[in-house]
Amino acid sequence: MSDTSQGGLVTEMPDITTRLKRIRTASPLSIRLLAWILLFSSAFTLLASGIQIYSDYRQDLNKIQQRLDVIEAGYSSSLARSLWALDQKSLQTQMEGILSLPDIDHLRLRIEPDSELVMGQSPRGDLLSHSFDLVYRDDEPFNLGRITITAGLERVYQDLRHRVGVIIATQFFTIFFISILILWIFRHLVTRHLTAMAVYTRDLSLKTLSRPLKLERPDTPGNRRDELGLVTDAINEMRERLNEDVARRERDAADILKFSQAIEQSPSSVLICDRQWHIEYANQKFSQLTGYTQDDIIGKHPSALVEQSMNSREAWHLWQAIRLQVKRVGVWQGEVNSVRRNGERYWEQLVVTPIKDSNSDTTGYLILGEDISIRKRYEQQLLRQANYDVLTGLPNRMLALDRLKLAIAQARRDETQVGVMFLDLDNFKHINDTLGHDAGDTLLIEASKRVSSCLRGTSTVARLGGDEFLVVLPGLSGPDAACQVADRILKTFSTPFMLGGQEVFVTTSIGIATFPQDSDNSGTLLQHADAAMYEAKHKGKSAYSRFTPEMTEVSHERLQMESYMRKAMELGEFELYFQPIIDTHSGKLVSAEALLRWNNPALGMVMPDRFIPLAEETGLIIPIGEWVIQEACKAARNWQTLTGNPIGVAVNVSPRQFRDPGFTDAVMRALDASGLSPELLELEITERLILDNSIETADILRKLDRSGIRLTVDDFGTGYSALSYLKSYPFDTLKIDKSFIQDVMTENDDASLVRAIITMAHSLGLTVVAEGVEAEAQTHFLKEEHCDYSQGYFYSTPLPEQDFIQWLDTNERAST
C-alpha cells in the first residue's frame, strides 16, 4: 500500500519506482500525436513556403521583364538616331550602358540590310530575351534594324536557393519546438492519466472492488466535467454495479440451485440463459433430446444450437425476433426445425419467457422445449394432401387459387400485372384409351415437369384435375411476358414423350388472361383463361390464345351448346343431309355423302363446324358418330330398295371417333343392323389423322379394308399431303378440297395443282372425287382431266333424306 499526496491516486501498486517508470515511458498515443503534428505541420509549411517562394520568383522575373521594357522605352529612339547618323561611338556607348544594367548579359544588333553587332556573353541556362525594332522617323518611318537583349536568370536562381534554405531551416526548428511543447502538454494533461486508468483497470478484481479510482490532478469542477473526469466516474459507477451484482449473485445462488433441482426431472427440456442470452444451465431432458451435454453448450448463445438446421444469419434473425417478442410481450412461443448432435432433424416446440427478480428486472431467460416431430409429420402430411396433387406433386386447385389471390393483391400494391394461363393437353383421352392409365399418368408427370421448367421461381404451376394445368405468373411488366412463357411451353412440347418405350407426340393448348386488363378478381380471370384456351383449341391445337371480350360470349355460347348437345341425341334433334356424288363422265349418281345437321329449337339449325369441335372436346362425338354411321347405312340400304341400284354412302370420321377402341365394332354393328354391303360404305378420313403414324392407325385402316369398306382421304391438299402415307395405307379414293376446285377456271396454279393430283392419284390406283363443283365449266375441265367423280352445288345442295329420295326419283327418270 502506497499513500500519495492529497488529490493523488490512492491504490495498491507494485512500488513507486515502477509507477514512475510507467509514467515516464513515452506514450504510444503521444508518439502518434507528435507524428501527426509533424506530418501536417510540415505539409502546410512546405505548401505555404512553396507558395511564397514561387511568388518571390515571379516578382524577380517581372522586375527583369520591366527592366527590359524600360530599356526599349529609353534607348530605342537614341539608338535609332545614332544608327541613322552612323555614329558608331555613340552606338557602342549606349549598348555598353545597357550591358551594365543588372542581369543584362548579351546584346545582338542586326543592322539593315545585312550587318550585325554583338556585345556581351550569351548566358547559360534559363534566360529572358526581348527584341524591338530601331525605326528612324523623318517624313516617313524607316526601319534601320532590330536589337535583341538577353537577360540571364542565374542571379534569380541563386536568390531563390538561398531563400529556400533559410525558410526550411527556420520552419523546421519552429515546428520541432512547437511539437515538443504540444507533446509535453498532452503528456501532462492526458496520457499520464490514461496510463493510470489502464493500471487501475488491469488490477481490478473482486478483491479490489472496494477501492475507487482517483487521478493525480486537482479535484476542481472543471476537471470533474472534462472527458477524463467523465471516464473516471463511469469506471467507478461500473465498480459499484459490479459490487451490486456480486451481492445479488450470492443471494440468488441458493435460489438458482433449488430451481435447478426442481426442473432437473422435468419432462420438457429446459435451458436457462443470463441477461446476455448465454446458456447457464441445461437439464437432463435437454441432453437426452439433443445429445449435447452441459459442457458442450454452457456459455453459448441458443442460436448456435439451430445454426446446423439453418444458416447463421437466419439463426441470428430468429433469435432477434424471439428477443424482441419476449421484451415486448413477455413470452415467445413457436416451432423450430432443430438438429440433434448426431445430425438428425426434429421439430421442437419452444416457449421462451424472461426470469425476473422481485423488482421485475430481467435476470435471465427460461427456454422450454418439447419434441413434436411425430405431430409435425402428421400435420405436414395432411397439409400436403390438402394442397398438393398426389400424382405430380404440383399445387392443387385450392393452393393455386390462394397463390393467385396473393399475386393479385401484390400486383395491386406494386402496380404490376399477373398472368393466368390455362393449359389442356391435346388428345390426352386418346393416350389413356390406347396406351393405358399408367402411360397417361407418366404423361401427366412429364408434362408437369416440362411446364415447370419454363417458369421462374416466383411463378406457380398447378394441376387442376385430369389433363388441365393452371399457371400463375406474378409481377409481369406487360401482357406480352405471358405470351413469351406460352411460346416456351409450346416449344418444350415439340419433342416426343417416351411412354412405355414408344415415342408419342402430345401438344397443349393454352389460354391466357391478364390482371388487371381482363379482370380484377381471380374467379373471372380463370373463366377468361378457360375461354381463351378453348379458342386456342379451335385454332388447331398446339397454340395459345389471349383472352378478348368476345370470348366471353363464345364461352357462354359453348356452355349453352354443350348443355343442349348432351340432350340432342335423346330428343332426336340430329338429322342427316345427303349430297350426291356424280360420275363426272356419265352424270349418274354413284353415292352420296352423309352430312350431319343439328336442328335445335333454341339455337336453330346448327352447322357442323360449330358443334363438331365441341363434340370432339367433350367426347360426345363418339356416340354421335356411331349414330351417324347407323343412320347412313340404313338410308343407303333404303335407297337400294327404292331404286334397285346399289347407291353408296360416304361418312366423315373425326379423329377422336376413329381412335376410339370401339370404333371398328361400331361400324360392323351398323352394317349388320342395316344389311348394307360393306363395299357401299365409304369412310372419309382427314389428312391430319393419317399423319398420326401409329400402329393403331395402321391396324384400324387395314381391318376396315379387309372387311370391304372403302376408305377415302378427305380434303386432300389442305394438310401435309404426305404421299408416302397414301402408298402405305389401303385407301381407295382421294377427295380434292373445294378450295382448289372453285378457282380452277381462273387460276392457272389451281388448275395445274388439280391436274397433278388427279394424275398422281390415278398412278397410285386411287379414284378421285372433286368437291365444291358449282359451275358447268368446272365439270368440263374435270372431264377433260379424267376426274372420276364430282360433288357440289352444281348437282345438288345437301338435302334431308326425304328430299334426297325425291331427288333420286327425279334423277332416275331424267337418266332414263
Image (cartoon, rainbow, N blue to C red):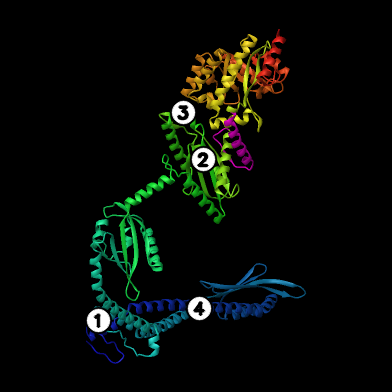
Residue pointed to by mark 3: 433
Q: Quick check: marks 4 and 3 in contact, CB under 8 Å?
A: no
Amino acid type of the residue that numbered disc 3 sits on in the rendered structure: Asp
Q: How far separated are the C-alphas under marks 2 and 3?
A: 29 Å
Residue pointed to by mark 2: 488
Q: Is mark 1 on a helix, strand or loop?
A: helix
Q: Give the range drawn in magenta.
A: 540-568
Specify whether residue 538 is in view.
no
In front: label 2 or label 3: 3
Q: Which of the 4 image quarters holds residue 578? A: top right
Q: At which x and y percent is residue 536?
A: 57, 36
Q: How far separated are the C-alphas under marks 3 and 1?
A: 93 Å
Q: Earlier in the sequence, mark 4 or mark 2?
A: 4
Quick check: is 519 in the magenta stretch? no
Q: How far separated are the C-alphas under marks 4 and 2?
A: 76 Å
Q: Which quadrant is the C terminus positioned in? A: top right
Quick check: is 557 in the magenta stretch? yes
